[in-house]
């Protein structure tokens, strides 16, 4: 925004805005981009140091080091970490990884100012640990207060959340949800996750389990789900469910991206199964909309790559049509940040934690560069 825009939006005088912007500029928190000779856009900036965003799954780790000083992004995967060969992840391993990243940042004279850790599992608000029903999948994280653990060992600002909440945060910060205070995000890939933003904040609920849309029952007598219920959204709209539905037609595909590509190339069965997935999503989301009343909903994850095919199915579901009949329905969109959304959301969260921010994702942030160990560089 220009200073004049800020003054209008905040109802502060231009002199006050000028004063505040100058103070922020002195701290390096904002910078100017000149629009013309008279007016400059004021943008948030993080022009010092590095932050690390780490996504921890059952047996997979992806860490991104965002170096704001050197404007460079570095990606690290399992193979870049000695002592981690796809075994089940654990807090000490991630701690070692962060220490490795601290070292990398130091050699670049761009010290690590904070880290975010995304866990592929629900985190309880009361204990700061993963919920009991995810213990089996993430056994080494059982009863560990994750944020407390890392803060104690590293003494740098740390934020922790589940992957879908971070993904929602990234889409809300820089994507389709921008500027919208009440936003819903649903992601479908191997599993279904979701994030709810209410009044500009991620809503965790008392238990920390808010946004777990996957096990909403949408078909009482539907397929059996691993959670023990029948007809959960998970049994209709995940990669596994989509491949299974397609398999019943005699077609075999190995991944959801494969299905999407074939649908784009005109395969009728693939188109049909994706459109039905959209309809199932519509059925589940219509219920959520009645309860929460979000103004914008974004579909992310691998399924987001299907774009209009899924969206058309969603909008044509009887429940969504009915929703429009009774009042103003929310906007449904495909998320704009489909790759590394969780990692970007982690960056948004940690920047906010240390009182910094960025107005938009710069091109260097989107460019995945693998510069882990020398070994991996050789392989690359
Ligand atoms: Zn279920």
Image (tube, rainbow, N blue to C red):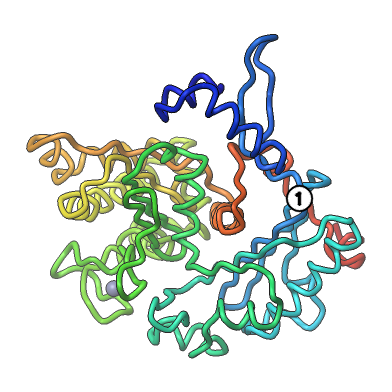
Image quadrant where one finds the C terminus: bottom right
Residue 311 at x, y percent in the picture: 33, 39
Please state if 115 lies on the left or on the right of 332 as rendered: right
Q: Is residue 167 above or below residue 104?
A: above
Q: Residue at x 34, y 58 (%)?
A: 237
Q: Is residue 296 above or below residue 165?
A: above
The residue carrying mark 1 is 73
Q: Residue at x 14, y 35 (%)?
A: 324
- The residue nearer to you, when weighing 89 against 253, is 89
Query: Which residue sits furthest top?
Result: 37
Residue 334 at x, y percent in the picture: 41, 40
Residue 86 at x, y percent in the picture: 68, 79
How many dots with numbers?
1
Image quadrant where one finds the N terminus: top right
Q: Residue at x 34, y 50 (%)?
A: 184
Q: Quadrant of residue 322?
A: top left
Q: Residues within 10 Å of mark 1 (few under 14, many from 20)?
A: many
Please state if 305 lies on the left or on the right of 186 as rendered: right
Q: For the residue with label 1, is its CB less than 8 Å from the closest atom of ligand 1?
A: no
Please state if 354 lies on the left or on the right of 4 as rendered: right
Query: Which residue sits furthest left?
Result: 326
- The residue nearer to you, when weighing 104 against 353, is 353
- Quarter of the displayed picture in which ligand 1 can be seen: bottom left
Residue 314 at x, y percent in the picture: 27, 43
Please tell me whether mark 1 sits on a helix, a strand or a loop.
strand
Q: Residue at x 65, y 10 (%)?
A: 38
């Amino acid at each position: 925004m220009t200073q004049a825009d800020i003054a209008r939006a905040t109802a502060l005088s231009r002199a006050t805005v000028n004063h505040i912007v100058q103070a922020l500029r002195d701290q390096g928190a904002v910078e100017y981009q000149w629009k013309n000779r008279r007016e400059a856009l004021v943008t948030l900036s993080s022009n010092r140091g590095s932050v690390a965003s780490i996504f921890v799954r059952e047996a997979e780790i992806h860490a991104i080091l965002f170096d704001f000083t050197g404007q460079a992004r570095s990606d690290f995967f399992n193979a870049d970490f000695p002592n981690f060969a796809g075994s089940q992840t654990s807090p000490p391993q991630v701690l070692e990884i962060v220490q490795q990243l601290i070292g990398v940042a130091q050699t670049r004279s761009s010290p690590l100012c904070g880290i975010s850790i995304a866990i592929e599992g629900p985190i309880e608000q009361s204990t700061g640990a993963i919920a009991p029903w995810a213990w089996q999948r993430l056994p080494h994280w059982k009863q560990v207060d994750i944020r407390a653990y890392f803060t104690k060992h590293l003494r740098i600002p740390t934020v922790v959340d589940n992957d879908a909440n971070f993904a929602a945060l990234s889409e809300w910060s820089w994507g389709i949800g921008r500027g919208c205070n009440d936003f819903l995000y649903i992601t479908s890939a191997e599993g279904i996750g979701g994030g709810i933003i209410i009044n500009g904040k991620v809503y965790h609920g008392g238990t920390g389990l808010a946004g777990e849309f996957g096990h909403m029952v949408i078909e009482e007598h539907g397929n059996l789900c691993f959670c023990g219920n029948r007809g959960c959204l998970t049994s209709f709209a995940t990669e596994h469910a989509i491949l299974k539905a397609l398999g019943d037609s005699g077609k075999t595909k190995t991944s959801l991206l494969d299905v999407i590509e074939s649908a784009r190339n005109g395969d009728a069965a693939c188109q049909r199964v994706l459109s039905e997935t959209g309809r199932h999503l519509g059925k589940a989301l219509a219920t959520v909309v009645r309860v929460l009343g979000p103004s914008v909903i974004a579909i992310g994850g691998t399924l987001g790559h299907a774009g209009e095919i899924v969206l058309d199915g969603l909008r044509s579901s009887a429940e969504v049509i009915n929703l429009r009949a009774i009042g103003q329905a929310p906007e449904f969109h495909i998320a704009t940040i489909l790759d590394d959304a969780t990692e970007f959301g982690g960056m948004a969260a940690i920047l906010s934690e240390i009182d910094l921010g960025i107005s938009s994702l710069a091109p260097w942030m989107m460019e995945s560069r693998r510069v882990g160990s020398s070994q991996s560089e050789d392989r690359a």
